[in-house]
Image (cartoon, rainbow, N blue to C red):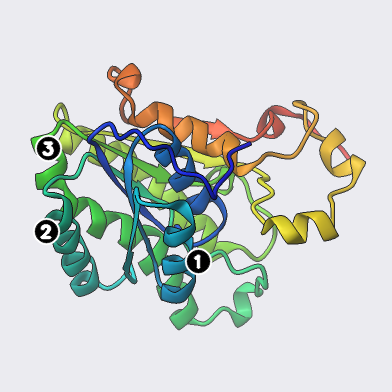
Amino acid sequence: MIDWSVADNSHNGRVALVTGAARGIGLGIAAWLISEGWQVVLTDVDRARGAKAAKVLGDHAWFVGMDVADEGQVSTGVAQVLGQFGRLDALVCNAAVADPHNTTLESLSLNHWNRVLAVNLGGPMLLAKHCAPYLRAHCGAIVNLVSTRAGQSEPDTEAYAASKGGLLALTHALAVSLGPEIRVNAVSPGWIDARDPSVRRAEPLSEADHAQHPAGRVGTVEDVAAMVAWLLSKNAGFVTGQEFVVDGGMTKKMIYT
């Protein structure tokens, strides 16, 4: 488990941009990369929380406010990163609208549908578009955070499922278009307990929640962060256009009720 309040004093010279990094999986990825010596730029629409997270993470964290669905903000944010650090080596597209209050198809508004796709699918496209020239200069990598919902669904999740299915397809399209200089892969988390630590302590998951997973437990943000970090590393130099499922084996489990 990472101590998110302590940043490694070493720096490997590489710069990563992580979207949706004010909380949850995005924050965990940022913390993990900093522990491996990266300079990490956190972005989020929640500017107050994002700035606070960067301050907690230490000198190797820097925050830029950004709505990834707004091309003007994406272009300006990427320019700020280049102005501050002079390079970009990795892009992690994690920002997403994941509305837990799902609605039936009959009551799904077109505005909500469009917003979910704009953030979850349009955002990664815009980030890739504006970051590609700088990633190419350093043979960088992109990791898109997809979801096991790209391949399976619960009722009333049309917008989210469609956006994540599209993002999986966008991943391999980008890998072919941007290779060989830029590698592009996807990580699809399953059930990850990405709640704030205080909430996890106050409302712990049940033994049944953990036991249903073939791995014996619900996932953590560190499980996802470790996979992302490997995909950004030179050790994954022959890996591109792929999906890596981090779900404790649940998508391989046959369930009958």
Task: Identify whether 31 is placed above or below 231.
Answer: below
Q: CA distance from mark 3 to mark 1?
A: 29 Å
Nearer to the camera, 187 or 140? 140
Classify mark 3: residues with Cα within 10 Å, few (<14), some (14-19) or many (20+): some
Relative placement, left or right, of 29 versus 144 is: right
The residue tagged 1 is 97
Q: Given this view, does label 2 or label 3 mark the residue nearer the observer?
A: 2
Residue at 29%, 17% (x, y): give it. Answer: 238
Q: Label 1: state its secondary structure.
A: loop
Task: Identify whether 211 is placed above or below 126.
Answer: above
Q: Identify which amino acid the numbered label 2 is placed on.
A: Gly
Q: Identify which amino acid the numbered label 3 is placed on.
A: Arg
Relative placement, left or right, of 179 versus 215 is: left
Q: Is residue 20 visible?
A: no
Farthest front residue in view: 9
The residue tagged 3 is 136
Question: In terms of sequence position, does the residue under pointer 3 or pointer 1 come before the other?
Answer: 1
The residue tagged 2 is 83
Nearer to the camera, 5 or 33? 5
Q: Given this view, does label 3 or label 1 mark the residue nearer the observer?
A: 3
Residue 59 drawn at (x, y percent): 35, 51
Q: CA distance from mark 2 to mark 3?
A: 17 Å
Q: Circles 2 and 3: CB distance less than 8 Å?
A: no
Q: CA distance from mark 1 to mark 2?
A: 29 Å
Q: Circles 1 and 2: CB distance less than 8 Å?
A: no
Q: Identify which amino acid the numbered label 1 is placed on.
A: Val
Could you tell me how many numbered marks the image carries? 3
Residue at 13%, 54% (x, y): give it. Answer: 82
Q: Quadrant of residue 84?
A: bottom left
Q: Quadrant of the N terminus?
A: top right
Q: Is residue 256 visible?
A: yes
Residue at 49%, 70% (x, y): give it. Answer: 49
